[in-house]
Image (cartoon, rainbow, N blue to C red):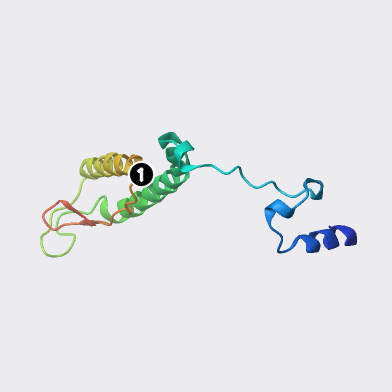
């Protein structure tokens, strides 16, 4: 909890520019100004790592969700004579998606995790 004096000190600072703040007020110092010429590709990639990790988690969750619905579908799963799906085929699809999406994300491109649906001919549609 703040004391009454600390609250008053903070109220005095509302609306002031960073340059007006005194270091004794125990406020966070603003980040150093960086010119764009000082930013490197590795800096950008580092900042992109959080985005990639979120995408990796999203991909794994989607693949798990899709596998529950697709793996083990037997022949005639749609009552129209469609072919079933084996775990081996699903593993190949997962491998393809991971390799492709990881490479795209490593190029710092924002591509959503695709929708994977079974196709009547025994293959998968990737949307």
Residue 35 coordinates in the image, percent (x, y)? 50, 42
Give the mark count.
Answer: 1
Quadrant housing residue 82: bottom left
* Disc 1 packing (10 Å; few <14; some 14–19; many ≥20): some
Question: On the picture, is 127 further left or further right than 31?
Answer: left
Between 120 and 5, the one nearer to me in the picture: 5
Residue 26 coordinates in the image, percent (x, y)? 78, 48
Between 126 and 74, the one nearer to me in the picture: 126
Depicted 66 relative to depicted 50: above or below: below
Quadrant housing residue 121: bottom left
Residue 42 coordinates in the image, percent (x, y)? 43, 34
Residue 4 coordinates in the image, percent (x, y)? 89, 62
Q: Secondary structure at mark 1?
A: loop
Depicted 21 relative to depicted 46: above or below: below
Between 10 and 38, the one nearer to me in the picture: 38
Question: On the picture, is 51 further left or further right than 94?
Answer: right
Q: Could you tell me which quadrant the N terminus lies in? A: bottom right
At 14% from the left edge and 52% from the top edge, which residue is drawn? 122
Quadrant housing residue 125: bottom left
At 33% from the left edge and 54% from the top edge, which residue is drawn? 112
Q: Which residue is mark 1?
A: 108
At 25% from the left edge and 50% from the top edge, which residue is drawn? 72
Between 91 and 51, the one nearer to me in the picture: 51
Q: Could you tell me which quadrant the C terminus lies in? A: bottom left
């Amino acid at each position: 909890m703040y004391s009454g004096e600390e609250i008053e000190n903070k109220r005095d600072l509302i609306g002031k520019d960073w340059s007006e703040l005194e270091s004794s007020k125990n406020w966070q110092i603003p980040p150093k100004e960086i010119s764009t010429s000082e930013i490197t590709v590795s800096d950008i990639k580092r900042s992109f790592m959080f985005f990639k990790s979120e995408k990796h988690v999203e991909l794994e969750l989607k693949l798990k969700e899709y596998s529950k619905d697709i793996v083990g579908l037997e022949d005639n799963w749609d009552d129209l004579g469609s072919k079933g799906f084996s775990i081996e085929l699903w593993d190949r699809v997962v491998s393809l998606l991971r390799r492709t999406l990881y490479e795209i994300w490593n190029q710092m491109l924002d591509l959503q995790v695709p929708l994977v649906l079974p196709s009547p001919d025994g293959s998968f549609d990737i949307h």
